[in-house]
Structure formats: structure tokens, C-alpha cells
Image: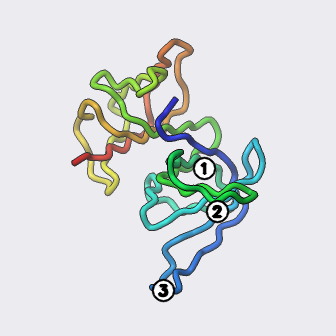
Amino acid sequence: MSAYPSITGVIQAVNSLQDTSAGNLCSFLLDLQTAGGPVSLLLTANTYVMGCQPLNPGDTITAFYDPDAPMVLIYPPRYTALAAAKTGDGIHAVLDIFSQDLINSSGTLKLNPDQSTQIRTPNGQNVPAIPGDSFLMVLYSSSTRSIPAITVPKEITVFCRG
């Protein structure tokens, strides 16, 4: 299991939250319909959205959150997203630390990038090769049924450390 659990659902509404002390609109509350029921998802100025794509009602997204972060005990549950990506039909997303051999921390997914895989930093710079022991956000569509499952990712975001 990834160090960062995910929530996948269809956006029902996007509401901007105004920071009255600063007078700006940097946070958004998304109402999601998930397989388990409704969920509220808070996107802040620090939330990474893969590809900087706008998130709109009707979009299917996968968002990742810190399971150790404080959480308001309300219904529907509200999570603060660390990262999010549009996932749509048959697209999967994972946020995890991958080893030198490009295997995730739980040993359940191995990446096998090819020339069609887009590998970038969060600001969109191309990365020629994935450094070992990297914190990655990965979009992929299919994988083998082996352990670990092997996939050719569509897109990889490399989060640089240090």
C-alpha cells in the first residue's frame, strides 16, 4: 500500500474559498461522489495538480492525502489533497516512493517507461531519466497481473528532494 492513500471520484461541484485575512482565492473545496459515498476535498495553493489541468464538475479525479494529517470529524469526510490528477476511464494514478528498480514502496507496482512516457518535474521540465529512490506521481492505464504488476506509464512526475 502506498504511503499516500487515494480517493477517486467524480467532481459534483467546485467552490472557491476566500481567505479573508489575505483577500485572495487560493483554496477550493471539491464535492466528490466516490464509490463509498460523498467526500469533500480541499485543494490549497500547495496542492499539486498533475499537468496543471483545471478540475471541473463531471471530471473523474484521483487525489492523494496524508493519512497522518489532522482531519475535521464531519460528514461528508473532508480531506486535504497533497496531489490530484484527472484519471477518467481506465486511467490509474499512484503517488509513492519508487526504488532504484522503479518498484513502489509496497512492492506491488513496477514501472517500465518507454519512449512514449512523459517524464517531467512538477514545473513541466523534461527529465531524461528517473533517478533511483524517487518520489513519483504516475499515471498509467493497464498493467500485468503479476506481482509486482508491471506497467508502461503514460506520464510520470518526479518530485525532487532536498
Identify the amino acid type marked 1: Ile
Image: 19 above or below 58:
below
Q: Which residue is mark 3?
A: 21
Q: Nearer the viewer, residue 140 or 106?
A: 106
Image: 35 above or below 122:
above
- Label 2 to label 3: alpha-carbon separation: 22 Å
- Label 3 to label 1: alpha-carbon separation: 30 Å
- Label 2 to label 1: alpha-carbon separation: 11 Å
Q: Which mark is residue 101?
A: none
Q: Is residue 94 left or right of residue 158?
A: right
Q: Is residue 109 left or right of residue 37?
A: left
Identify the amino acid type marked 2: Leu
Q: Is residue 3 left or right of residue 127?
A: right
Q: Secondary structure at mark 3?
A: loop
Mark before the other along the chain sequence, 3 or 1: 3
- Residue at position x 52%, y 12% in the image: 146
Q: Are marks 2 and 1 in contact (CB under 8 Å)?
A: yes
- Residue at position x 52%, y 81% in the image: 19
Mark before the other along the chain sequence, 2 or 3: 3
Residue 17 percent location from the top left of the image: 59, 76
Q: Which residue is mark 2?
A: 30
Residue 137 percent location from the top left of the image: 42, 42
Q: Secondary structure at mark 1?
A: strand
Residue 34 percent location from the top left of the image: 72, 47
- Residue at position x 58%, y 46% in the image: 62
Residue 84 percent location from the top left of the image: 52, 51
Number of residues whose C-alpha sits closer than 10 Å to that of mark 2, classed few (under 14), some (14–19) or many (20 or more): many
Q: Which residue is mark 1?
A: 61
Mark before the other along the chain sequence, 2 or 1: 2
